[in-house]
Amino acid sequence: MRLLFQFLLTVLTIQISSYAFAGDEDVVIVKESPADSVVENSSAHNRMNKKYSLTVMPIGFGPLNGIDSEINVGYFLDRKSIVSVRYNNLVKGNTCTGSLSCSDSGKAYGVSYKRFFGNSFYVNTAIDQREISYSETQSDLGAGNYWFNFKGSSTIFSVVVGNQWQWKSFTLGCDWAGLGVPLAHQITNENDSGDNAWSASNRSDRETMYVSGSVAMALRFYLGASF
């Protein structure tokens, strides 16, 4: 029994000694990456040393309440941030069919600040001034014969999230989703004729839609160049 105990004690002593001598010498130490580092040839890397950008959005939703187009000119503060001026034109707003006909036009111009978090993801905040003209006619007597038009303007603050990828000079991106909220608005040049009850109700709805209401912003794909 004593011999067995001495044998086990010897084995245990040898094991402890081997670990003590080995320590952590066989562990590979990986150097810690700097907190502010980029991957070579990534979008973040390709944004470095850029000063200007010019992008075009052929079609998207917002800041005008409908389908818009946009021209955007930006200036890089650094690889993580861009300030821009932009101009939007309303392509298609409210849809009217049958005895109901309508016509709309609109434009918006504003400034924005885009901040990148990581390689391509960003948050973009903007202030836009919108100007809208709208007219609507209902020619069906049974549905309330009327005609009205108005003009309006509003200042909105918007926040959107998106991704922007950079290859050398080529830029591709999308504002995936966001919301614009009016800070101030004004309705001008209101005109009505016909069934005033229908006219006033529908005009109020359209004024909210185009001028005084919030606007969802989504799927704003754009492309261009950065240099």
Image (cartoon, rainbow, N blue to C red):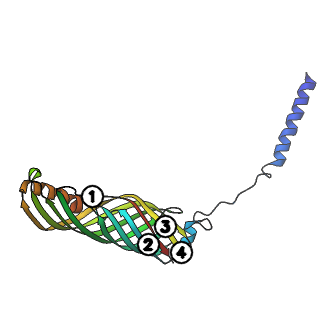
Q: Give the total number of marks visible in the rendering.
A: 4
Residue at position x 11%, y 61% in the image: 147
Which numbered dot is residue 214? Answer: 1
Q: Which residue is labeled 3 in the image?
A: 172
Say which quarter of the image contains residue 87: bottom left
- Give the side of residue 176 with respect to residue 62, left or right: right
Res. 170 visible in picture: yes
Tell me which residue sits at (14%, 65%) in the image. 149
Comparing 227 with 78, the one in front is 227
Task: Say which amino acid is labelled 1.
Answer: Ser
**How busy is the neighbourhood of tag 3: few (under 14 within 10 Å), some, or many (20 plus)?**
some
**Residue beneath disc 4:** 169
State if disc 2 and disc 3 touch (CB < 8 Å): no
For disc 2, the neighbor class at 10 Å (few under 14, some 14 to 19, many from 20) is many
Q: Earlier in the sequence, mark 3 or mark 2?
A: 2
Q: Secondary structure at mark 1?
A: loop
Reading the image, the residue beneath label 2 is: 55
Q: CA distance from mark 2 to mark 1?
A: 25 Å
Q: Position of residue 163 (x, y in %)?
A: 47, 61
Q: Mark 1: give few (<14), some (14-19) or many (20+) Cα within 10 Å.
A: many
* 27 vs 113, nearest the viewer: 113
Above or below, comparing residue 118 to residue 77 in the picture: above
Question: In front: 75, or 26?
Answer: 75
Q: Nearer the viewer, mark 2 or mark 1?
A: 2
Nearest to the eye among marks 1 and 4: give it: 4
Percent position (x, y) of residue 117?
49, 62
In this rendering, the label closer to the viewer, 3 or 1: 3
Q: Position of residue 179 (x, y in %)?
A: 33, 58
Q: Judging from the image, what secondary structure is the residue with disc 4 in?
A: loop
